[in-house]
Each structure stands twice: as C-alpha cells, then as structure tokens.
Amino acid sequence: MEAKEISKAVIKRLPRYYRYLGELIEENVERISSGDLSKKMHVTASQIRQDLNNFGGFGQQGYGYNVHYLYMEIGKILGLDTIHPMIIVGAGNLGQALANYSDFEKRGFRLVGIFDVNPVLEGISVRGIGIQMINTLPEFLKENPVEIAILTLPKHKAKEMANVLIKNGVKAIWNFAHIDLDAPEDVIVENVHLSESLMTLSYNLSQYRKEHVEEKKETEN
Amino acid sequence: MEAKEISKAVIKRLPRYYRYLGELIEENVERISSGDLSKKMHVTASQIRQDLNNFGGFGQQGYGYNVHYLYMEIGKILGLDTIHPMIIVGAGNLGQALANYSDFEKRGFRLVGIFDVNPVLEGISVRGIGIQMINTLPEFLKENPVEIAILTLPKHKAKEMANVLIKNGVKAIWNFAHIDLDAPEDVIVENVHLSESLMTLSYNLSQYRKEHVEEKKETEN
C-alpha cells in the first residue's frame, strides 16, 4: 500500500470515513454498499469508491465493504494503530477540556503530561495527571518520549514555547494558539484557529442575510 | 461591493488577513506593501493582490495598503461590524473555555446565555453569565434575540438540541459535537471536528516517519 501518493483532499476525508465507519460498527452493521455509505455521508458513491481505491480495493462489486476491516485499515493509514505519547502545554480551560477528552486516549493519543506557567494550577490533577510547571518541561522531554504537544497557550507565549518543544525533540504540534508557528520542515504542525472558524460562520451568516434581504426587496418591488 | 461573487478559497483566507492586519495595527504599522504583507503571511504577493481585488482596489501601486482601512473593510465583509448575540449549549470544559474567550466579544460575538443539562452547573457563573438549565432554552429563545448557538454537547445529545435551536429560530450553529447536523438550508452550520484535526496530524506524522525510515534504509543499503 503506497499511502504516500494520496492527495490532500482524500486525506481530509479519511477521518470522516473513519468516524462514520465507527458509527456503523456501533450499530452492528457488518457490510455496507458504497451506495448506502454515500447516503449516510452525503458524498457521492463514486467519490467514496475513488477515495478508497487509493488504498487498494476494500470493496467488492455487489457485495459492499466489510465495515470492520475498512475501519481498521483506515485507522492504520491515519496512524491510529500505534500509541502517540502526548502532552498539553497550557492548562487553562481549553487545555483542561482537551485533557478530559477520553476519546483521544481510545485512538492511541496517550496524555502523559500537562504543563502551565500559573503556579496556582501546580499539582492540580486532570484525569489523573498532575499539572506541572512549564520550567520542568525540557527535563521532562529528555526523560519521557513525547510525540505530540498540544499548544493551548495565549499567543504571546506560544511561539517561545513552540521553540522549546521543537528544540527538545517534539515532532508534532497541535496548535490552538492564534498564531502561525515557524516550525522546521520535520515538525508537523496542525492548526486549530477557532476564531477564524467563527469568522467564517459570521461571513456566511452575513452573506445569507444580505441575499435574503435583497430577495425580499425584489419581491416587494 | 459585491461580496457574493467571492470564492470559497478567498473566504477561507479572509480571517487570516484580518488577523495579520490586526497584528500590524498592534505594531503601529500604518501602511504595508503587498510584498511585505506577503512575506509576513507566507502567501505570494500576487495572491494577496488578487484576493483583495475581489473587494475593490484597497491598495495603490507603489504606495501599499492602508492597514487600518483594510482591516475595517475586511471586518465588514466578515460581518464583524455588527453585534451577534450568541449562546453556548453545553457548559462542560469546552463550553466554559469558549465562554471565557474574551476575544470573541471584542469582534461582536456577544455571549447572552449558557445552557446545560447538568443540575450541578445550574447558576454557576461564567464571565458573569449564570448557567441555565436546558429546558428553559425554548422560552429564552422566544424572549431574546439569538443569532448563533455554540453547540458543545456530547454527540448523542447534539442532534436533538440542534433541532430545538433551529425550531426556535437560531440561524447559525457553531458545532463542536462530533457529528454532522442535518440543518435546513437557511441555517448556517460551521463544524469544528477536533478529533478529525488530531487524526490529520497523526496521519502526517505517520507519513513523515514512514518516508524518513525509508530514506534511512536507502542510505544504509
């Protein structure tokens, strides 16, 4: 299987396939046709077939997909078949919210440390993990294998801390700070810019309103 | 200005332009050339020119963009020049984290209510707003204008609650539940699927590792 050739658009759809297949497993569905999967996912059946063909033929004509097998295979492609030790840097509301997502743990994202600058938070336990002060982070990274760092610090601290993480061998940053990090090529950065998502919502809402008002005016004239 | 014709790709870049322009204002920069803006944003200068030309000519040849004017105009296009009354449905960690984002308020997203099903949370105040029980939500929506609902409930409750929101006139849902909502066409839905973002990170990490290991093997042979 040559996952390397897969396009970005397909990669973006993979977690969604994975989610829907997980739901089918919960519903005890063992096989599903691309047609039925398509209805469930609001994607065309040919899109699904094309996407899945990137990973070899998981489906059989007239027989459909084996849900569990497909789920496991997509999980492997997404790297969910291995354990990813993970830390959270920034134990504010958002950091604590993410620490409490037990679903991440189920997928192999194992939380091994939580760090903050605020001494008030020191030692407070979130899902059994005590919050540590950030100045102990370099030492911690030397002693513990950590793959992913979740960065939930305010933006003025995020860049500096990202450099500390990178310098100490963290290979992936899930960045919630409202800033673009300058990471070297061998460090994977995935951004979640929440306020940009809210602005997109606001844009769509304004546009809809504008069109709606214009339609209304035209009807009235 | 005919914002209606603007492509989705441009719309996705607008909040980013807005963010960078905001940073420039903080740094007291009054004018910037598309070349300098381009370096700052890691986008080509011609991309910036093309994008901004969609909204009319904000820049002048050899003179650059007026930062504050451009910031305000993009804000208007994003609908940030009006107040958007907003509620949070689901006052768990994530809901409370979002309630505490004072930056949203600055952009016109005014939090007017927080709701949850958990009686333990009733009356607890987040940023001066007491958490109310979810059964009071329909009544609240009748009495208070609410544009946007932030849905931070577990997925098994999200669909039902989305229907309540829509039935009671909420026109936009910012959905953090790990589920796709079936909303009518006149309701704007913007999804933040955090675990899908984490899986994309994990995919990229696995791919990088795979390539790196392969390179290493080739060097060793």
Image: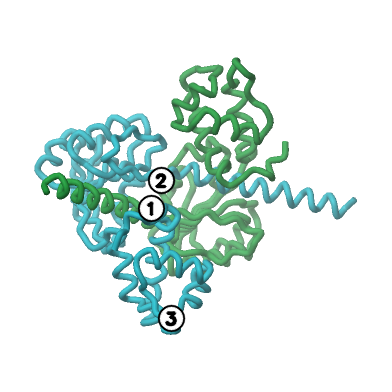
Chain colours: A green, B cyan
Q: Which mark is residue B220?
A: none
Name the residue tied to disc 3. B61
Can residue B124 be seen here? The reply is no
Q: In front here: A65 or B165?
A: A65
- Given the image, on which type of amino acid does mark 1 rest? Ser
- Given the image, on which type of amino acid does mark 2 rest? Val
- What subunit carries mark 3? B
Mark 2 near mark 1, Cβ–Cβ under 8 Å?
yes
Quarter of the image for residue A77 reads top right
Quarter of the image for residue A91 reads bottom left
Mark 2 surroundings: few (<14), some (14-19) or many (≥20) residues within 10 A: some
Mark 3 surroundings: few (<14), some (14-19) or many (≥20) residues within 10 A: few
Q: Is residue B69 left or right of residue A73?
A: left
User: Which of marks 2 and 3 precedes in the sequence?
Assistant: 3
- Residue A80 x/y as whole percent: 60, 38
- Residue A49 x/y as whole percent: 59, 29
- Residue A129 x/y as whole percent: 49, 47
Residue depicted at 34% across the width and 53% down the height: A198
- Residue A78 x/y as whole percent: 60, 40
- What subunit carries mark 2? B
Name the residue tied to disc 1. A197
Name the residue tied to disc 2. B192
Looking at the rendered structure, whether the residues under marks 1 and 3 are on a common chain is answered as no
The mark lying in front, picked from 1 and 3, is: 3
Q: Is residue B107 left or right of residue A217?
A: right
Secondary structure under tag 1 reads: helix
- Given the image, on which type of amino acid does mark 3 rest? Gln
Mark 1 surroundings: few (<14), some (14-19) or many (≥20) residues within 10 A: some
Specify the quadrant that holds the N terminus of chain B: bottom left
Outermost residue, front side:
A221
Residue depicted at 30% across the width and 64% down the height: B75
